[in-house]
Amino acid sequence: MANNPKAKLKTLYLMRILQDETDAEHGLSLRQIIERLADYGIQAERKSLYRDIEVLREFGFDIQTFQRNPVQYAIVKRDFTLSELMLLVNAVESCKFLTARQSRTLTTNLKLLASDHERVLLDRRIHVPGRITSKVESVFGSIDMLHEAMRCKRKVKFMYYKYGLDGKRHATHGGKPHLVTPVGITFSDGYYYLTAWNDDHECMTEYRIDRMERLDVSSIRATRNEQITHHEFEGEDHEVFGRFGGEPVTATLLVDSDKAEIIMDRFGDAAEWFRHDDETAQVVVKIRKSEPFFGWVSGLGGTVRIHAPKSLKEEYREYLKRLLED
């Protein structure tokens, strides 16, 4: 064994074997470990394995001894529990800004943090039906580039695309590159957005990062003004519907009892609840007034109704009338 160059790596191979094949429910006996090492071309004795296991324990690996017949050894504590890995894999699978290839790569890497037995369970993770994936693989690189531009106080230049009535992507801005000052990046509804100052329109504009192409950090210095310096990103996520901003309004909604969960899912602890009658509650929430908000209310089929203010009710009526127009 002294002449075997792999012998020097015995402790590392032992670590790999324990990481891959053991967990809180599954262990390996010394005989099994010796057989696994032999598969790697390494001969090992029980006495040396005791020393290797102690070395790994001193290094920080939580190797437990299971008093079974025969005695087994296992790495019990890992960086992530199986339930945490399950959540991470499901989160990756649900991300709209990831392409199918990126999603597969990330989930494969996450599975490497689990044992072989746990990987089987991760393969049975929750399925996300009809998941819409991005066709652009440069989102991560674009985010890094935008942060670099903000750090260096430079403008960014890029082409921006939107879908037309023909179902195809078309360049905006007359087919010319956009040149803007990046202000901040936000994540909402499965997508990353850039908030930027647009000198042409003298206002803040939002761009979905996965719709950007040929992004580059310009040599032009970023614009500086009071609006950028004092810009605050719009309040809580629950106030904004579909990334549409609008006038902030404190609204009172009448909510049927069977729709209480929907309100809690949307507004959480920000909602104030008051009893209206035996079947209805008055819920006070802060929203950004917009057509997507009105669409959300109408989509609930009258089980959630706008109670106040009166001006918001009138605008909602006008919105419904426009929907009925030919």
Image: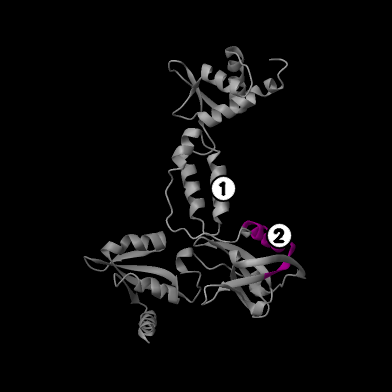
| Point 31% across, 62% down: residue | 260
Residue 61 visible in the snapshot: no
Q: x, y (%) of residue 73? A: 51, 22
Looking at the rendered structure, the kind of residue marked 1 is Leu
**Image height of 188 relative to 165, above or below:** above
Disc 2 element: helix
Q: Viewed as shown, does residue 81 lie left or right of 219? A: left
For disc 1, the marked residue is: 106
In the picture, the disc for residue 77 is none
Q: Nearer the viewer, residue 287 or 244?
A: 244
Q: Which residues make up the magenta segment?
A: 140-158
| Image coordinates for residue 169, horizontal then vertical, percent | 58, 72
Q: Quadrant of residue 20?
A: top right
Find numbered disc 1 in the image and state the secondary structure of the residue it sits on.
helix
The residue that appears at 67% across and 24% down in the rendered structure is 9
User: Majority secondary structure of the magenta segment?
Assistant: helix
Of residues 286 and 263, which is closer to you in this image?
Answer: 263
123 magenta-colored: no
Residue 183's quadrant in the figure?
bottom right
Q: Is residue 48 left or right of residue 297?
A: right
- What is the x, y in percent for residue 214? 69, 66
